[in-house]
Image (cartoon, helix red, strand yellow):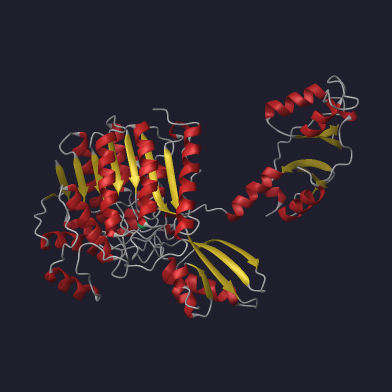
Amino acid sequence: MFEIIFTGKYAKYNLGAEHPFSPLRMKMTLELLEALGEKVEFTEPQPVEPDELFKIHSQDYVEAAEAVSDGKEIPNAEKYGLGTADNPVTEGMAEGARYICGGTLLGAKMLIENKAEKVLQLGGGLHHAHYSSAAGFCLYNDLALAIKEMTQNGMYVAYIDIDVHHGDGVQEIFYNDDKVMTISFHETGEYLFPGTGSIFELGNGAGKNLKLNVPLEPFTEGESYLEAVKKVAQTALSQFHPDAIVIQSGADAHFSDPLADLLLTTQDYEKLFRLLIELGNNFAKGKMLFTLGGGYSFEAASRIWTILYLVLSGKKIPKNLEIPENWRRRWSGILGVELPEFLHDRPNSYKAIPRKKEIEAHNRDTVRRLLDLSTAGMFYF
Amino acid sequence: MLLREIMHTDVLTVSPDTKLCEAYRTMHERKIRHLPVLDGEKLVGIITDRDLRFATSKLSEVPFDPEETVQNVMIKKVITAHPDDPIEIAARIMRDLKIGSLVIMENGKLVGIVTGIDLLDALLALTGVHRPSGRLDVRLSDRAGELAKLTKLLAERKINIHSILTYREKDDRVRVMLRLNTMEVRNIAEEICQMGIEVVWPVHVSCLR
Ligand SMILES: [Zn+2]
């Protein structure tokens, strides 16, 4: 069974009108689904209390975040990554982030209690939030909280991160944990934020060889991306056999994303979602929790997450499915940009990349080196 | 960065009459390759795993017996450095003389040791990514105030610089690579372009064609 989690309260996590991590993206997605005739029924989560976050964040960090969010001045906000260009302080943001955490946590509970097989949390995915600091638009790590809930209930969990940025916060929080495998596919940190996510970051202690990173070349296209995902995720999951998979479904690897340099199309995303579901069905008893994530071309992100919803609900997506006029007119007015006529990208929508072959070869080498490294001493299961 | 910041201060040493087999065992067990030789507090030599293996190898013309002492095998002219020497001096000496370690002396006393591996650690500390950051790569004209223009803008945008690497390119321009604590490097890169500075990365932003 497929469950949706959402509440309008997520919008309290609002980092300012000009900030790219905008709650509008969820609104656009929901309205697009409705415009396409989908009746989206969702369960509304409660926010978590600040002290529930101590499982994954330091107490002093949570207290600092709550204080600034309440408008209080604190002396060392910088130390906690608060009040920076990426993580400005806005009133109520901590409460908003706790609603988001509550949503992802609710998803975890649905899987633990067998109330759902697949869950789509229409928000969250704050994968850059670290144990003791905010970073990269992320305040509280909803993903880590959900994963922790599952491992504390005896589950082994695989975390797959398809956001274009390295899932550094989640990786850090479970770096020594043998119940959590993390796999991140991202544009190489040599160029892109946050800089980490090299193949040599394999975990530590009991968690050794359970943290996998696939840093891809800038301008990587869908075919090469999907080849890497298939090879690495299949190899890893077939040996780890998790009880559930948590997926951070960032949409910022799309070619139109203003913050990064990968070149996935909506068609690639549809294939990617179908592939991940197949892997989940084969290796994780079908239990999967999807969250949103990055995605800063608002229109591309809302189309991609609409596709995620349609795929999860078992629908076929017609090649030329048109986007209803009312949605386009409304959001075109709000955003002040032209919006596409179709749900899927049109062919040849970005300029051909002259270094295509070189990029593909480089990515293949990366995957080979990663698997050599990680299988050398690895997989305990 | 000074040698004082990267040197090992808990230095294992041997004396001139330590047996070769004992020196070998120490190196093997402690996973080290260099042992300074002290006579009391006085530095009189250094012995490396390579010297030891050559000296005792069956392939040597007259192999040393493992029971013989270190003083007959050690190198007596030890190359040393001062803790306040910068690491680039150490790198230069070790590269030129092709040696694997430098003994660090202060006031005539041995206070530390630095090996090639420590220099690699230093390189990583200088160039590595230690906090979440994105890359900005620019070319500057080689004149006063260019970098200042850049850093002033970053400060105004509340963007913190985690590291700066720079080197001179062939055409006498200065390549500067920065790691910035922001996801939105492109935004700031566009502004930098407007100021007439060439942006190498992110490429889409290069407004100077
Ligand atoms: Zn992202």
Which residue is rendered at x = 29% and y = 43% of the image? Answer: A246
Which residue is rendered at x = 40% and y = 66% of the image? Answer: A352
Residue B126 higher or lower than B12, as above or below: below
Give the image location of residue B112, x and y in percent.
74, 41
Of residues A88 and B91, the one drawn nearer to the viewer in this rendering: B91
Q: Quadrant of residue B111?
A: top right
With B1 as the anchor, is B17 left or right in this view? right
With B27 as the anchor, is A241 left or right in this view? left
Q: Is residue A112 visible?
A: yes
Which residue is rendered at x = 30% and y = 57% of the image? Answer: A251
Give the image location of residue A72, x and y in percent.
34, 60
Which residue is rendered at x = 56% and y = 64% of the image? Answer: B177
Of residues A188 and A47, the one drawn nearer to the viewer in this rendering: A188
Give the image location of residue A189, x and y in percent.
47, 55
Q: Is residue A122 visible?
A: no
Q: Quadrant of residue A30?
A: bottom left
Residue B174 higher or lower than A139, as above or below: below
In the rendered image, the quadrant that contains the N terminus of chain A is top left
